[in-house]
Image (tube, rainbow, N blue to C red):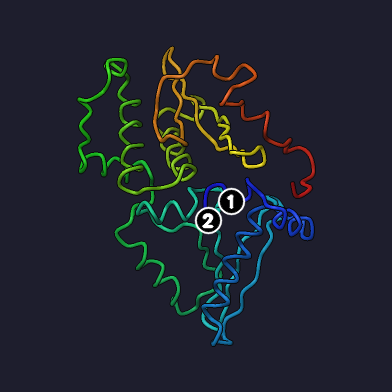
Amino acid sequence: MPDFYGLNPSSDWKENREKHNRRVCYELSRTLAKALMELFRNNDNYSVCILYDKDLTHYFVGLTCDEYSITLDLDDFYSIKDLTRIKTGLTAEGIAVLDDSKGKFESALNKFNKGRGKHAIKKIEADTTISNPNIEGQNPNQIGEPDDIIFLRNAIEILKEKYNIDSQGLFEYIKEIVDIKLGPEARKKVWKRLEGKFSAETRYIRCLILNVGDQQYIIDADKMLLRSFNKNELEGKNRIFIPYKELSRDWGEPYDGI
């Protein structure tokens, strides 16, 4: 699914959404469930369903057969999304084995995960050592920057060039590294407005502002770069970066599907 899925809805998308009043994870689950049904079309032993987590207001997929029962959540709230994890060589974490008395599925899952790292920061540290990015070409404004900023800039370059992940995959991956390297208190999420040719085509993606010492930086997921940031960029009528809370719903309110 592209990172802008559900953020640039067509009239058909809006009409279908009104009928089921569900969030994007429901539609992603329907796509995955349909793909599994096609995969097992000639095998009546398999059953597919969509599951609902009431506490998280979240939907994911269930698959069951005579030998095992599992859940598949590509949008796992507790780790980097599985699509990003797998593309960057990390373990699949969005699969939960509920029932597998003979260990058939668990064996297959362990075989898939063998040799893959679980933690993003360890994977990117290994990639940095192997790739040994040449940072001598930094512009003068980057010389003397903190080691953590240099590391994050190199990590972004690797994710962009080696794994070719999309903007929100980059955001998810880097956010986990930032939380370990700098701590979650050192960063805040902001939206970046991406103008479309028409107003209906305008969409917003997540970026990160970092506070390191007395300097602010931004990880621009759209341009896939890290640069110095001025707080004035969050102000003004024609601003591109927007404080996160201004475009996020109040989670204290009941979810209405929007």
Residue 16, image x, y percentages? 74, 59
Determine which of the numbered discs, if any, sits on residue 136 in the image.
Answer: none
What residue did someone put label 2 on?
Answer: 1
Query: How far apart, in angstroms, are the residues tagged by discs 2 and 1?
Result: 6 Å
Instruction: Determine the residue located farthest toward the top in the rendered image.
Output: 214
Q: Amino acid at mark 2?
A: Met
Residues at circles 2 and 1 in contact by the CB criterion of under 8 Å: yes
SS assignment at label 1: loop
**Residue closer to the observer: 172 or 56:** 172
Q: In the image, 95: left or right of 228?
A: right
| Snapshot quadrant of residue 22 | bottom right
Which residue sits at x=39%, y=28%? 226
Q: In this figure, which residue is indicated by the disc labeled 1?
A: 5
Quadrant of the image occupied by residue 197 = top right
In this rendering, the answer to whether 108 lies above or below 72 is below
Q: Position of residue 146 (x, y in %)?
A: 32, 20
- View extreme (front): residue: 197
Q: Quadrant of residue 26?
A: bottom right
Q: Position of residue 132 (x, y in %)?
A: 20, 37
Q: Residue at x 39, y 72 (%)?
A: 108
Question: Which residue is at a point 21% across and 41% down the rendered structure image?
Answer: 131
Asked whether, in this view, residue 258 is left or right of residue 171, the answer is: right
227 on left or right of 59: left
Q: Does 15 appear above or below 70?
A: above
Q: For the residue labelled by badge 2, is the local secondary structure a helix, a strand or a loop?
A: loop
The amino acid beneath tag 1 is Tyr
Residue at position x 55%, y 53% from top? 75
* Number of numbered markers: 2
Determine whether 241 is above or below 221 in the image: above
Q: Position of residue 232 (x, y in %)?
A: 55, 14
